[in-house]
């Protein structure tokens, strides 16, 4: 695929996302705000499916995992201990003419890429944390930050979980939550934004066993990729060299995805050693040790961290699923989303919008499906052909049409409906009394 074709595909995905209610520009009626995006009705469904699958696989289904929802605002000392106050920065350059700022490591020349006439100044460091004030009065102790990562909320609650549940090592704490980074140049749709959501686990282990646990989480991350339906051929592991790893990491693997704008990081898996708990113990003066009940040894556990971005997952799914083909005599756009993540799994139509008998029967079928498959949509807007195209664009795997054969059966058995497959366009008659089972089998396949 040429660079122009890749750029064209990205523009089409952004356009579809807005047109069909997946993702909107934040504050759009006021001209927007760079790096901020709002999830529409279908985007919320897709995003929640991504999160629910992760939560079930990484937390709920495991006896060694505990869930958490830590506060976004934390004591300033948390970020001093973690090193974010002094070291969480990117190199920045500013144009001497238009005054726009850019990340320094993105350019090979000193000419402003925006106005073309200005020169980029000397590189300086820019802390990416959003600073805010807590309380009515400014002063000592009133500074806080919108968290730049969710991990520290887990580390500062390590002792609380130990005291409440007395878990045996190894065990983990997982959470899904918002994080914020004042990116110098947010770009590439929802890939790099100033507000985003993370799905993270901090898995506490004995140092001697770090390799086996690292490999186990590595395998689970690949399993998650498979379950949500990402093409594994588009995902690649990058062993991050020592000079590029974070200061706390002894080993890091980046899972990279082939986005239209290039191969970029999707997920990360890091062996964080005992760095974080040690730093918080040092600064807080609170013991963050684990007592082994069998050996009576006290020690600070080491940590394996699988970190997955919600927004980047959504973006990868949209890029992976986007298709164009020809059906009949028309060019068709559709999202080949895996049923596990599709925001709508089944759409139900009456053939004619104004026919009361068809509408009544369609509602009965719709209600029967909804009791077992909540992600079902009733659609009677425009003609059936347009409804099919609309459902194709939002990635609905199956459409059910209630027509006159359903009511009268002149050309075939009564009480049958037309079941249409999104990917092939194939249509077949299915009895209403076996429809739910047929749909459930197909959605599980």
Image (tube, rainbow, N blue to C red):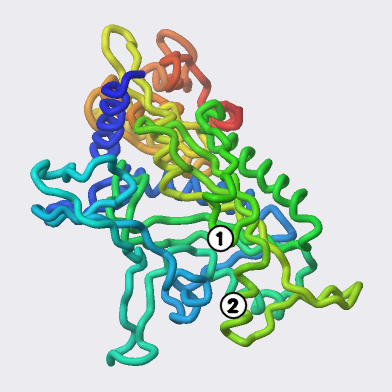
Q: Is residue 70 above or below residue 395?
A: below
Q: Is residue 251 above or below residue 373?
A: below
Q: Which mark is nearer the camera, 2 or 1?
A: 1
148 relative position to 306: left or right:
left
Q: Residue at x 13, y 57 (%)?
A: 99
Q: Residue at x 54, y 50 (%)?
A: 243
Observer able to see residue 361 = no
The residue wearing badge 1 is: 247
Observer able to see residue 427 = yes
Q: Position of residue 148 (x, y in %)?
A: 42, 64
Q: Residues within 10 Å of mark 1 (few under 14, many from 20)?
A: few
- Along the line of sight, the residue nearer the viewer: 130 or 174: 130
Of helix, strand and loop, which one carries label 2? helix
Q: Position of residue 392 (x, y in %)?
A: 36, 26
Label disc, if present, on residue 280 of the rendered structure: 2
Q: Are marks 2 and 1 in contact (CB under 8 Å)?
A: no
Q: Residue at x 54, y 38 (%)?
A: 228
Q: Residues within 10 Å of mark 2 (few under 14, many from 20)?
A: many
Mark 2 to mark 1: distance in Å? 16 Å
């Amino acid at each position: 695929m040429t660079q122009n074709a890749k750029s064209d595909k990205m523009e089409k995905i952004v356009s579809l996302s807005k047109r069909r209610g997946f993702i909107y520009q934040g504050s759009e009626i006021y001209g927007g705000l760079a790096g901020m995006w709002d999830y529409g009705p279908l985007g919320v469904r897709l995003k929640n499916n991504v999160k629910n699958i992760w939560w079930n696989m990484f937390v709920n289904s495991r006896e060694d995992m505990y869930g958490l929802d830590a506060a976004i605002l934390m004591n300033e000392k948390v970020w001093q201990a973690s090193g974010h106050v002094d070291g969480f920065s990117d190199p920045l350059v500013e144009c001497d003419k238009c005054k726009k700022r850019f990340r320094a490591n993105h350019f090979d020349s000193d000419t402003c890429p925006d106005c073309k006439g200005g020169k980029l100044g000397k590189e300086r460091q820019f802390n990416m944390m959003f600073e805010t004030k807590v309380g009515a009065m400014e002063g000592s102790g009133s500074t806080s930050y919108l968290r730049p990562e969710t991990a520290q909320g887990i580390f500062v609650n390590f002792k609380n979980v130990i005291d409440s549940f007395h878990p045996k090592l190894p065990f983990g704490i997982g959470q899904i939550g918002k994080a914020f980074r004042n990116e110098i140049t947010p770009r590439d749709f929802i890939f790099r934004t100033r507000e985003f959501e993370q799905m993270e686990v901090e898995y506490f282990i004995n140092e001697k066993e770090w390799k086996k646990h690292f490999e186990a989480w590595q395998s689970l991350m690949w399993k998650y990729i498979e379950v949500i339906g990402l093409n594994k051929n588009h995902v690649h592991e990058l062993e991050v060299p020592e000079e590029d790893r974070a200061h706390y990491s002894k080993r890091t693997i980046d899972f990279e995805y082939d986005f239209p704008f290039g191969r970029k990081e999707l997920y990360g898996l890091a062996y964080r050693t005992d760095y974080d708990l040690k730093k918080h113990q040092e600064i807080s003066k609170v013991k963050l040790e684990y007592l082994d009940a069998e050996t009576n040894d006290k020690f600070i556990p080491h940590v394996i961290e699988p970190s997955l971005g919600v927004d980047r997952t959504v973006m990868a799914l949209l890029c992976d699923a986007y298709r164009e083909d020809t059906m009949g005599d028309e060019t068709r756009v559709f999202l080949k989303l895996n049923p596990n993540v599709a925001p709508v799994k089944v759409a139900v139509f009456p053939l004619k919008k104004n026919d009361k008998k068809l509408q009544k029967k369609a509602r009965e079928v719709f209600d029967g499906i909804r009791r077992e498959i909540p992600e079902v949509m009733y659609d009677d807007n425009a003609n059936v052909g347009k409804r099919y195209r609309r459902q194709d664009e939002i990635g609905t795997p199956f459409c059910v049409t209630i027509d006159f054969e359903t009511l009268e059966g002149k050309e075939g058995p009564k009480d049958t409906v037309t079941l249409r497959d999104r990917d092939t366009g194939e249509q077949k008659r299915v009895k209403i009394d076996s429809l739910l089972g047929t749909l459930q089998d197909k959605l599980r396949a």
